[in-house]
Amino acid sequence: MRLVHFTLQDQFHFGMVTDANEFLDLDTAVRDYYGVNPVKGADPSRFRDMQAFFRGGADSVALTKKIVEYVDRRRAMGWTPRAATGARFLFKAEEGIKLLAPVVHGNKIYCLAQNSRSHLQEQGKPIPTQPYVFTRFANSLVGPSEALVLNPTATFPDVELELAAVVGQHGKHIPAAKAMEHIAGFTIALDMGYRDLQYPAGGGPTDWVMGKGFDATMAVGPWVVPKEEVGDPYPLTMELKVGGVTRQKGATSDYVFRIPEILAHLSKGITFEPGDVLSLGSLGGVPGFEFGNESRKLKPGDAIEATIEKIGRLTVPVKAEAPPPPAGPGTAPAA
């Protein structure tokens, strides 16, 4: 099951990609399903978006499977999939589908640093005693139909592949033993950063905001796969290519801190909500992974391809940010 947010002719949809690579709008399809299979007290609002779906937990997954079976059964009878209201809910990619990041705008994004043995080894750093986390904001996110954007302020853009877990249930003070009950599923994250801004010249402190917080620097997608279908996320094989050349290859078993430890640690003081994202960190890469390897610098026109076992493939291009408009007559100089 591949859960997605997408637009068609500027209309937002929440749904899934079927085995036939069609896009099913679940919000509309569930109303048609209940029209034929009435259930007293049924609440179709759980298919409004990804966040509402996650709140429904395993029941949302089970109902989605029934909807897919219903659609397949009706289509086998020669039926065109239109709801009782006349609203269409099955689309093809060639009709102009635009995939969005499969997360809800405004949810919290946590990124693990120094969380793989191979990455720590290439940096010459010891294994930390507790998770080391920074945050991102919605401005940095792009979806599978968009590009990572290079800002002219920086000189060393780099990218890393990470497994991301999506929170499904509200919770605080979450015991590690129950942490996976709060996870809805998994997706792929591409964490782009600017090494020269993250590690300022002169040996100043690490600047996470300037290094990792710029617009359009984190791609997430192309979908969320429910945890029931992924199973144990350790190990899952991972590979990152740029321009067809492998830059990272390994498995999630390389992670130092796993989801139960991370969620238990952060939830001591943070309330997690459906749709929050935990990006679990980068694996090691080619020699000179972070510093001094000019070949790692991203450039306009690069194509990034990321794959994670049981989740799929995320492919995004890289482009340069458009220059700011020229200052017009009478424009006040910057303070």
Image: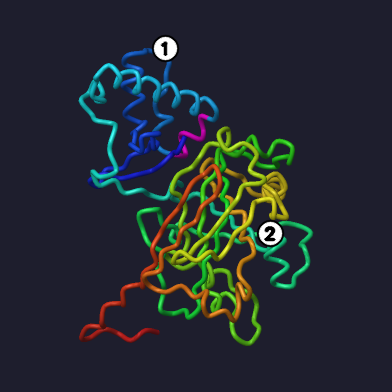
Q: Tell me if residue 51 is in the magenta stretch.
A: yes
Please report the bounds of the magenta region as a residue range: 50-56
In the image, residue 302 lies at what x, y percent? 41, 68
* Image quarter of the C terminus: bottom left
Q: Amino acid at mark 2?
A: Asn
In the image, residue 132 lies at what x, y percent? 69, 60
Side of 310 relative to 18 (left or right): right
Residue at the disc numbered 1: 40
Along the viewing direction, whichever of 269 and 286 lies nearer the viewer: 286
Q: Please say if 76 is above or below 127.
A: above
In the image, residue 253 lies at what x, y percent? 69, 50
Number of residues whose C-alpha sits closer than 10 Å to that of mark 1, classed few (under 14), some (14–19) or many (20 or more): few
Q: Earlier in the sequence, mark 2 or mark 1?
A: 1
Q: Quadrant of residue 65?
A: top left
Element type at marker 2?
loop
Front position among marks 2 and 1? 2
Residue at the disc numbered 2: 115
Number of residues whose C-alpha sits closer than 10 Å to that of mark 2, classed few (under 14), some (14–19) or many (20 or more): many
Along the viewing direction, whichever of 140 and 257 lies nearer the viewer: 257
In the image, residue 153 lies at what x, y percent? 44, 80
